[in-house]
């Protein structure tokens, strides 16, 4: 009887964790059409028209001036992305808000970084052009 209780207790503890992992992996994958923009949070993915997947990995560095503060230099945010084709290893690249590169060319498309929020989640808005 104790063995059954222990198993049940373990299942009740693990169930919410497993459910959150499943919902995070399916909810954070959207499509990005040519000429359109999409806003991604770190870890989120977008599928491009050619079937490749763009993932916003994380903000690598942020020297931007805080909101509602007047600074001498506006600063720069450096964001890390991954682009993966179905049959290949992902390619990592950086995009910046002020410094170069502000865009990345791959698979006949150009990915532009349009904006990055100042909040702790640092959401990135990217645009896909032909």
Image (cartoon, rainbow, N blue to C red):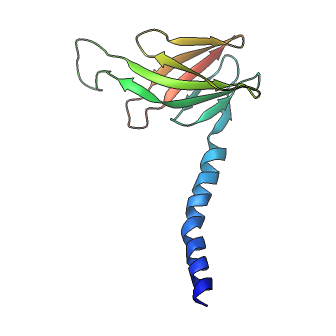
Quadrant position of the C terminus in the picture: top right
Q: Quarter of the image containing the N terminus?
A: bottom right
Q: Is residue 18 above or below residue 64?
A: below
Quarter residue 16 falls in: bottom right
Q: Residue at x 59, y 26 (%)?
A: 82
User: What residue is at 60 percent from the left and 84 percent from the top?
Assistant: 3
Image coords of residue 10 (percent x, y): 56, 73
Tell me which residue sits at (50%, 27%) in the image: 124
Q: Pick the residue in front: 5 or 72.
A: 5
Report the residue at 55% width, 77% height from top: 9
Q: Is residue 49 left or right of residue 22?
A: right
| Location of residue 118 (image quadrant) | top left
Looking at the image, residue 46 sits to the left or right of residue 6; the answer is right
Q: Residue furthest front?
A: 3
Number of labelled discs? 0
Q: Position of residue 32 (x, y in %)?
A: 67, 26
Position of residue 52 in the picture relative to residue 62 (left or right) = right
Expressed as whole percent of the image width and height from the top left, the position of residue 45 reads 62, 33
Residue 26: give x, y in percent of width and height.
67, 45
Vertical arrangement, residue 42 with respect to residue 66, above or below:
below
């Amino acid at each position: 009887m104790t063995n059954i209780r222990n198993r049940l207790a373990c299942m009740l503890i693990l169930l919410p964790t497993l459910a959150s992992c499943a919902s995070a992996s399916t909810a954070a994958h959207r499509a990005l059409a040519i000429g359109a923009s999409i806003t991604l949070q770190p870890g989120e993915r977008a599928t491009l028209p050619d079937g490749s997947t763009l993932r916003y990995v994380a903000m690598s560095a942020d020297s931007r001036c805080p909101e509602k503060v007047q600074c001498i230099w506006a600063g720069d945010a450096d964001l890390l992305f991954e682009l993966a084709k179905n049959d290949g290893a992902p390619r990592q690249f950086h995009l910046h808000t002020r410094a170069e590169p502000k865009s990345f060319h791959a698979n006949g498309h150009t990915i532009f970084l349009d904006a990055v929020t100042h909040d702790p989640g640092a959401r990135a808005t990217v645009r896909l052009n032909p």
